[in-house]
Image (cartoon, rainbow, N blue to C red):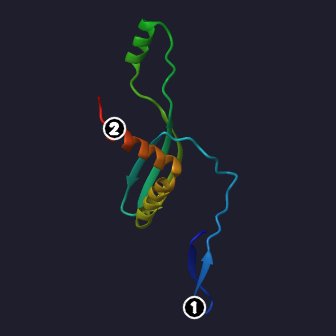
């Protein structure tokens, strides 16, 4: 359920309204495997990128030459979100709570813990 927002009424009294989240056909999901976080005095900038390694083909010598010639890997910006500094802590807590409540991620974490506690031969 969405949290309620408060706004002043014509009489000056606060009125609570439930937030209704509405999708937008212009906003498309994008895959991002790199993220950059920057900030200034009022905003935190979350910039998401999709980086794809270059295609490298050929025999061993050709592959070696192509790899040696690489100087950078392009990362295409797929989204940027600006969050006011005074809201970023809640944003981070919401992400952490979502990860903690995810059964799939919790199972992976438990599996890692169990494998770390398993005696080694």
Q: Which mark, by number, is residue 40? A: none
Give left or right: position of 15 versus 120: right
**Front residue of 45 and 100:** 100
* Location of mark 1 (residue): 12
Pinpoint residue 37: horizontal percent, then vertical percent.
40, 50
Other-residue count near label 1 (Cα within 10 Å), few / some / many at <14 / 14–19 / ≥20: few
Closer to the camera, 64 or 10?
64
Q: Earlier in the sequence, mark 1 or mark 2?
A: 1
Vertical placement of 85 versus 30: above or below? below
* Residue 102, horizontal then vertical, whole percent: 51, 52
Disc 1 vs disc 2: which is toward the camera? 2
Task: Give left or right: position of 105 versus 117.
Answer: right
Tag 1 and tag 2, C-beta contact below 8 Å: no
Circle number at residue 118: 2
What residue appears at the point 44 percent right and 12 percent down from the top-left corner? 63
Q: Secondary structure at mark 1?
A: loop
Is residue 48 among the parts visible in the rendering? yes
| Helix, strand or loop under label 2 | loop
Q: In the image, what residue occupies the spot 40% across and 12% down?
A: 64
Nearest the eye: 115 or 31: 115
């Amino acid at each position: 359920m969405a949290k309620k927002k408060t706004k002043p009424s014509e009489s000056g009294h606060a009125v609570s309204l439930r937030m209704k989240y509405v999708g937008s056909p212009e906003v498309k999901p994008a895959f991002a495997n790199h993220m950059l976080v920057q900030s200034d005095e009022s905003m935190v900038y979350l910039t998401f990128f999709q980086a794809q390694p270059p295609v490298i083909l050929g025999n061993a010598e050709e592959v070696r030459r192509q790899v040696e010639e690489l100087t950078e890997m392009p990362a295409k910006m797929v989204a940027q979100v600006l969050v006011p500094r005074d809201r970023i802590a809640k944003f981070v807590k919401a992400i952490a709570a979502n990860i903690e409540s995810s059964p799939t991620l919790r199972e992976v974490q438990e599996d890692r813990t169990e494998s770390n506690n398993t005696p080694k031969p």
